[in-house]
Amino acid sequence: MDRVKILVVDDESRMRKLVRDFLEREGFIVLEAGDGEEAMEWFYKEKDIALLILDVMMPKMDGWQVCREVRQTSKVPIIMLTARGEERDELQGFGLGVDEYISKPFSPKILVARVEAILRRTHAFDAEKTADAGGIVIDKTAHQVKVDGHDIELSYKEFELLAYFVENQGIALSREKILNNVWNYDYFGDARTIDTHVKKLRNKLGEKGNYIKTIWGMGYKFEVE
């Protein structure tokens, strides 16, 4: 993997060192910040930060405030760290556009694996501009989708939804997370909008519509059979 820049934000120097050591071992360039204000200074100074690892509880600006400010101008991937494993924290994180959510204590190896998975999804898709998932070929530049070689007509949001599913193959996606990423972070509409679009998308994909699995009570997962 190319050497990419990751910003690690935590007020505990011991935690920053632990995360930094494991990331640097895998070839990443690591920047460190001890509070939210320092994190934003780095973010505005370094334009090529590929991913943020943010602690929730910090002085000056907490992780939620940093996330809100970053999301005003950027969709850079964010992993949120917290000592609290409460569901409402996780839902708040997804509501602000957090990509992954990891509770402390955690395995540094698991964190590195999550970092690499997110970067593979975001960078690979951007680099190639096309993706092939089980006979569904998406061309992001031309905004075109083919199923088994045949063009299919999708609305703009149907296309964005399919692209998001393909980028996140095999990952369970909550309706809130889909809304945040496909309908943008400031969308406050009804989550049933997603269900309507998924139904139309499945119909247009024909048999391959079965790749979109429903996860009852949560959302959806795209999985090639």
Image (cartoon, helix red, strand yellow):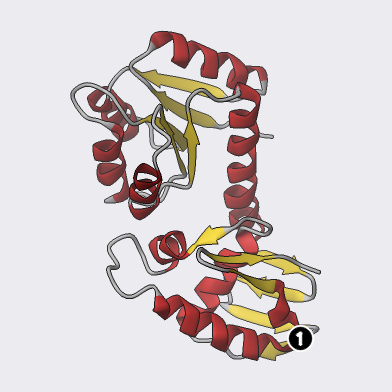
Quadrant of the frame with the N terminus: top right
Q: Is residue 103 left or right of residue 135?
A: left
Q: How many marks?
A: 1
Whether residue 137 can be seen here: yes
**Quarter where residue 38 is shown:** top left
**What percent of the width, then of the height, locates residue 189?**
30, 74
- Measured as percent of width and height from the top left, residue 53 is found at 45, 31
Classify 91 as above or below 81.
below
Q: Image point 27% across, 51% down: which residue?
A: 72
Q: Residues within 10 Å of mark 1 (few under 14, many from 20)?
A: few
Q: Is residue 42 above or below residue 101?
A: above
Between residues 15 and 72, which one lies in front from this camera angle? 15
Residue 3 in view of the camera: no
Residue 190, percent from left and from top: 33, 75
Q: Residue furthest left?
A: 60
> Would residue 170 appear left or right of 35 to someone viewing this image?
right
Kindly identify which residue carries mark 1. Answer: 207
Which residue: 22% across, 21% down?
59
Residue 200 position (above or below residue 18): below
Residue 168 position in % (x across, y down): 61, 58
Task: Give whichever of 128, 97 is nearer the camera.
Answer: 97
Specify the quadrant that holds the C terminus. Answer: bottom right
Task: Say what amino acid the circle numbered 1 marks.
Answer: Glu
Does 172 sit left or right of 98 as displayed? right
Name which residue lies at 58% across and 73% down: 162
Between residues 182 and 76, which one lies in front from this camera angle? Answer: 182
Looking at this view, name the residue that lies furthest to the top. Answer: 14
